Amino acid sequence: MKPIQALIVEDDFALGDVIKEILQISGYQADLVRNGRQAMEHLSQHAPDVVILDMHLPEISGLVILDFIRSAQRLADTRVLVVTADTDILDSIRQRIDAGFVKPFSAMQLLKTVQQLCAKLMPSDMDNNP
């Protein structure tokens, strides 16, 4: 089975690198982009299983990216995890995202949330037994 595909959209270089490493160590295929324009380009060509999305980004905001994901039929199954320092934005978009939390967050919190969001994408042992 192919690994779960994750797109990380984070302009904080250190945080983006840490998130990518956490996901890769855990067996996910993770791509990292640093601004909203790069995210839109990536999403125009790929349909990741999960997007880890910051809201305050250079060039194109996380809100525009979220709108794009939610309006594109080919991204209908893409889960969106918002990580932001802005509690007001997070509160205002809760109904449109699959999960979200405020920075700072722990590596375990991130990994557990991504695993929960992607659980339906991975077949269980019962699915493989006749």
Image (cartoon, rainbow, N blue to C red):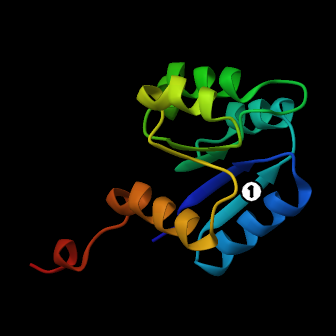
Residue closer to the observer: 39 or 81: 81
- Tell me if residue 73 comes above or below residue 112 in the rendering: above
- Tell me if residue 105 comes above or below residue 27 in the rendering: above
Residue closer to the observer: 68 or 17: 17
Q: The disc labelled 1 sits on which kind of residue?
A: Asp
Residue at 59%, 20% (x, y): give it: 67
- Tell me if residue 71 comes above or below residue 79 in the rendering: above
Residue at 81%, 60% (x, y): give it: 15
- Tell me if residue 84 comes above or below residue 93 in the rendering: below
* Residue 51 visible within the image: yes
Q: Quadrant of the C terminus?
A: bottom left
Q: How many marks?
A: 1
| Residue 122 at x, y percent in the picture | 37, 66
Residue closer to the observer: 3 or 35: 35
| Residue 103 at x, y percent in the picture | 68, 52
Residue at 48%, 35% (x, y): give it: 97
| Residue 84 at x, y percent in the picture | 68, 42
Question: Which quarter of the figure has residue 43?
Answer: top right
Q: Residues within 10 Å of mark 1 (few under 14, many from 20)?
A: some
| Residue 120 at x, y percent in the picture | 32, 57
Question: Which quarter of the figure has residue 36?
Answer: top right
